[in-house]
Image (cartoon, helix red, strand yellow):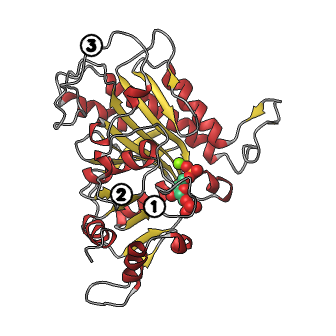
Amino acid sequence: MYRPLGITVSRHIMDLQRMHPEATGDLSGLLNELIVAAKTISAEVNMAGLADVLGMSGKTNIQGEEVQKLDEFSNNTIKKRMARCGYVCVMTSEEEDDIIPVSEGYEGKYTLAFDPLDGSSNIDVNVSIGTIFSIHRRKSDDGEPSFGRRSTDSGDEWQSAGDEGGSAEDLLQKGSRQVAAGYIIYGSSTMLVFTTGEGVHGFTLDPSVGEFYLSHPDIKIPGKSKYFSVNEGNYTYWDENMRRYIDYLKEQDLEGGRPYSSRYIGSLVADFHRNLISGGIFLYPKDNKNPAKPSGKLRLLYEAAPLAFVVEQAGGRAITGDGRDILEIEPQELHQRVPLIIGCRYDVDEAEDFLSGKR
Ligand code: AHM
Ligand code: MG
């Protein structure tokens, strides 16, 4: 069978590291461990229709072992692998209430926030789902530069780390301080898309050899699109500006490229990935559906910030629609929700004008 002599993701990571002679290799190590976890999850996702993985947890499989739901399985896989990898000091997961400490003696200099399996309502219906991750340096680290460190970081507030575990404070850092972020989409093929602040690169898993190969180097999102992704069922809960914007996208203006087409999968990674590659704007705005969730549904640390880092590195933009850039938000709590408007720069700018009442 033909096998391309492609660039594997490990080689790509080593190449990035080589561009930074000061790098210790910890970020490379961390990414490689995460990739192993992703491959494990991918294998399980692909077996979902065959093995007795679907359905409620607490069931037993043919060997009498307890079967976990896929989102639990994904959470546990990442947690266990990363807790003893030696590169992270603390983690947080969308699936857990509190911070996840790492094993004693394995404290590293990075923090990891992850959504182990986003779009879990789509698991049982064979729709693409994904893992999202976000990596920061711990606040208490010495701040020595390594590859992936963003050039805007001054490093001023960084102090000596010692070998203690990290805290929630280490995780509550704004998105502009991420050193790496990305996602794995379990779709018609499994793809890893990530950035370390030097462009966005996509890798496709060849399941027969268990390797991710570089398939989408230096991804750039189109400047403008003709697609919008939003749950229009929430129209009645939106404010007037948001309604006017969506009405505007649906009006006929052939020269201006309207009406836009609608594409909404209801699985953030799938919607985002589609828009990243083919162009589009995704919106999960604030709404008044649930008074307990005035900022919409999506989470800053696990969903909005990592995808914002990816989209900005690809030339796009991510905002809240109330005057803030996603990457500039100082998180107050681990599970904080934010409105998310993300995608092609022209479209996000235009949405911003509507949502701020300028148009
Ligand atoms: P989850 O983290 O519980 O899976 O929920 C997040 C998902 C996103 O993938 C998706 O964009 C959104 O929820 C869809 O929500 P809705 O069904 O309200 O449109
Ligand atoms: Mg999620």
Question: Is the shortest distance between ligand 2 and the CB of mark 3 under 8 Å?
Answer: no
Label 2 belongs to which residue? 320
Q: Mark 1 points at which residue?
A: 286
Question: Looking at the image, which residue is at 42% across and 17% down?
Answer: 86
Relative depth, front residue between 194 and 98: 98
Q: Seen in the image, is 290 located left or right of residue 30?
A: right
Pointer 1 or 3: first along the chain: 3
Residue at image location 37% in from the left, 80% down from the top: 249
Nearer the viewer's eye, disc 1 or disc 3?
Answer: 1
Q: Quadrant of residue 125?
A: bottom right
Q: Where is residue 283 in the image (x, y as percent from the top left)?
A: 42, 64
Quick check: 64 above or below 4?
Answer: above
Q: Is residue 286 above or below residue 55?
A: below
**What crowding class fits label 2: few (fewer than 14 Cα within 10 Å), some (14-19), or many (20 or more)?**
many
> Which residue is depicted at the point 33% across and 22% down?
26
Looking at the image, can residue 266 be seen? no
- Crowdedness near tag 3: few (<14), some (14–19) or many (≥20) residues, C-alpha within 10 Å: few
**On the image, which quarter does residue 121 sit in?**
bottom right
Callouts 2 and 1 close, C-beta under 8 Å: yes
